[in-house]
Amino acid sequence: MLHAKHSLSMLETSWTQSVLDLRAVPEVCQNPAKSSGGCCPCLAGPWAKPAKKAKEGLQELFIHPPAHCVTCSSKFAEKYEHDVSVFHADLVASKMRFYIFYEVPWHIKMRCIMAPVMGTTTEKVMAPAVADATKLGYEKLYRLLLEHSKKEIAKGLRIMTKEENFPVLVHCMHGKDRTGLLIMLLLLLCDIEPQAALLDYAQSEMELRTARDSKRFNLASHLTTDPVLASSAEVMQSTMEYMNQKYGSAAGYVKSVGITDIEVSRIRLNLMKEAATKDLMSRMEAA
């Protein structure tokens, strides 16, 4: 995992080919255009539903990695003076925010509702609540992400299926929660020992505290407290145990989000080279 102290230097030295942003998609990047029954007018009316089902079936057969964001890619190119493909995968989209809000105690909900009247923001109320295990906690947050952000997790994983996207810089706000979860899945898919993945996750807290103490953070104070920056190995271990108990393994989980065996092999090929080549050959022999 690329920690905060490495991110800027990688962009400035042209090492990064792609950026995977797991935060909310900027409004300027959102495409409001919606299809109305297909690209051909003749598919309207009674043919609309069959055409839609046929289109969905074709999409399942020919799954392509998501397209990059032209707006953000252009901004990065201007700022860092080299081409970077920026991809968005919002792991805390509106549905996920609802589940988080539902899980916090009623008095936190009331404080969020009253935030504008009290001269504060919902972020200032929710940030410490999410970090507090008596109110929500990261262990429960990660389980919610695994269960209710599957579409976006699949999108993030599919970025890793294209060799031309590498090296990929993955980030969110702190680079430990949404990013930590996705990196954990990638490490386990590549047969990295779980203990190594736990240590990688736990290192984030040390890096974040160092960045805060050296005043290299450009974040509000309520986002840089010790509880908010925490990344306990025990929390990620509990997340792994939950995933293994319900899905059998990381491979079983990514299959539940729609990632195919061939896509897993492509990810392994891009990250592991020789080992993944053997893996792909074994899949072809078993087919």
Image (spheres, rainbow, N blue to C red):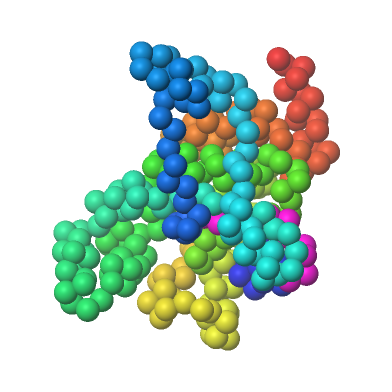
Start-end of magenta stretch: 12-22
Front residue of this view, candidates 111 and 230? 111
Image location (x, y in percent) of residue 39: 50, 27
For the N terminus, give its image quadrant.
bottom right
Residue 13 within the magenta-colored segment of the rendering: yes
Image location (x, y in percent) of residue 120: 25, 76
Residue 43 higher or lower than 171, as above or below: above
Residue 72 within the magenta-colored segment of the rendering: no
Residue 6 higher or lower than 51, as above or below: below
Residue 123 higher or lower than 23, as above or below: below
Q: Residue furthest front?
A: 41
Image location (x, y in percent) of residue 93: 40, 50
Query: Could you say which quadrant of the image residue 75 lies in?
Result: bottom right
Left or right: where 153 falls relative to 195: left
Q: Residue furthest bottom?
A: 214
**Residue 248 visible, this angle:** no
Q: Residue at x 22, y 65 (%)?
A: 112
